[in-house]
Image (spheres, rainbow, N blue to C red):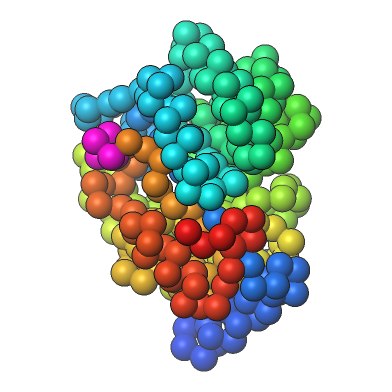
């Protein structure tokens, strides 16, 4: 599949789209059968030092923030493991404060001792080599760092205090340290054409990472791009299906943001070839509203996510659907 084929497929509607998604599901089944990975998410902190123009965590936005205490984090981890989760994503805004990072490393070391069976995944933005190495030594196996867009000019417009080259250097650092890396793009960005998305997909294939994702553009409340429309659901789902076809062995989630674009979006992501679901059931309830990447109501309840998976005849890859 070349660049022009991808551009054309991204525009698929009706029967063409159904055929594209069916082909993607067939590829998923060829490598994974009817099983999907189930991840819990713990949001560790809503503070961030970046100024991304689309994100509700940008430091320029005056929203209430939080950082979990060690006790809160360990209790949250105990809770999701008790529910049967064996893959847990821990994420926060980007913070390079040394005190923050030292406590984070201590907490991960404690988690590894208490729950050696859990696959730990984290997303803390770009850090430094020493932190990556120490995080890996604590037993964290996976790292999430999306390149967002492979177009350097668009990247600069969206993330004025960062550069794409810097981001890509850190993707390589993470691989060198020994992390299983997850990366990917945002679909439907202001100023993004289908050709840009095709380049993103080809770039992701070239990266050859074991995990990838695409998220629909949804501007955070009060952010610089708040007035722009959400991404088109069909475009995002077509991107996901093409990701499956181009990278058939990859772990690809149907992201919670699809539900904001359109109710039922999460299930449609599974029907487009996704083989991962994320459940936002780890963050303490009273703090959930303070992690505002998009807006307050952004996640399906755990039972609805799992019932969606089961209704499609899919099973948990690494855990029962509980």
Residues in magenta? 285-289
Q: Is residue 17 left or right of residue 120?
A: left
Q: Which sits in the foreground, 75 or 279?
A: 75
Residue 3: x percent and y percent?
Answer: 68, 67
Above or below, 314 against 81 in this view is below
Q: Which sits in the foreground, 42 or 152?
A: 42
Above or below, 184 against 43 in this view is below
Toward the front, the furthest residue is 82
Is residue 183 found inside the magenta-colored segment of the image? Answer: no
Residue 113, quarter of the rendered image? top right
Kindly identify the residue that appears in the image at 44 percent across and 52 percent down.
Answer: 279
Kindly identify the residue that appears in the image at 71 percent across and 40 percent down.
Answer: 180
Above or below, 103 against 20 in this view is above
Is any part of residue 301 visible from this angle?
Answer: yes
Residue 232: x percent and y percent?
Answer: 38, 67
Q: Is residue 172 left or right of residue 47?
A: right
Residue 223: x percent and y percent?
Answer: 27, 39
Above or below, 183 against 132 in this view is below
């Amino acid at each position: 599949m070349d660049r022009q084929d991808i551009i054309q497929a991204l525009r698929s509607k009706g029967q063409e789209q159904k055929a594209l998604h069916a082909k993607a599901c067939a590829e998923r089944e060829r490598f994974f059968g009817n099983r999907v990975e189930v991840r819990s998410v713990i949001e560790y902190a809503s503070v961030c030092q970046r100024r991304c123009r689309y994100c509700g965590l940008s430091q320029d936005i005056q929203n209430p923030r939080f950082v979990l205490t060690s006790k809160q984090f360990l209790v949250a981890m105990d809770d999701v493991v008790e529910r049967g989760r064996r893959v847990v994503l821990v994420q926060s805004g980007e913070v390079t404060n040394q005190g923050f990072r030292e406590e984070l490393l201590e907490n991960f070391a404690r988690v590894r001792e208490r729950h050696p069976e859990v696959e730990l995944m984290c997303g803390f933005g770009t850090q430094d080599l020493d932190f990556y190495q120490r995080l890996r030594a604590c037993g964290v196996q996976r790292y999430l760092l999306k390149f967002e867009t492979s177009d350097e000019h668009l990247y600069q417009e969206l993330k004025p205090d960062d550069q794409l080259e810097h981001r890509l250097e850190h993707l390589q650092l993470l691989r060198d340290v020994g992390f299983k890396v997850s990366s990917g793009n945002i679909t439907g960005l202001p100023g993004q054409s289908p050709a840009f998305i095709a380049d993103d997909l080809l770039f992701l294939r070239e990266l050859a990472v074991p995990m990838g994702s695409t998220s629909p553009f949804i501007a955070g409340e009060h952010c610089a791009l708040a007035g722009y429309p959400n991404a088109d659901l069909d475009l995002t789902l077509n991107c996901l299906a093409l990701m499956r076809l181009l990278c058939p062995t990859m772990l690809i989630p149907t992201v919670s943001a699809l539900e904001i674009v359109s109710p039922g979006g999460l299930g449609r992501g599974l029907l487009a070839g996704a083989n991962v679901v994320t459940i936002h059931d780890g963050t303490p309830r009273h703090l959930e509203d303070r992690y505002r990447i998009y807006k307050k109501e952004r996640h399906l309840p755990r039972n609805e996510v799992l019932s969606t998976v089961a209704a499609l005849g899919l099973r948990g890859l690494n855990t029962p659907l509980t």
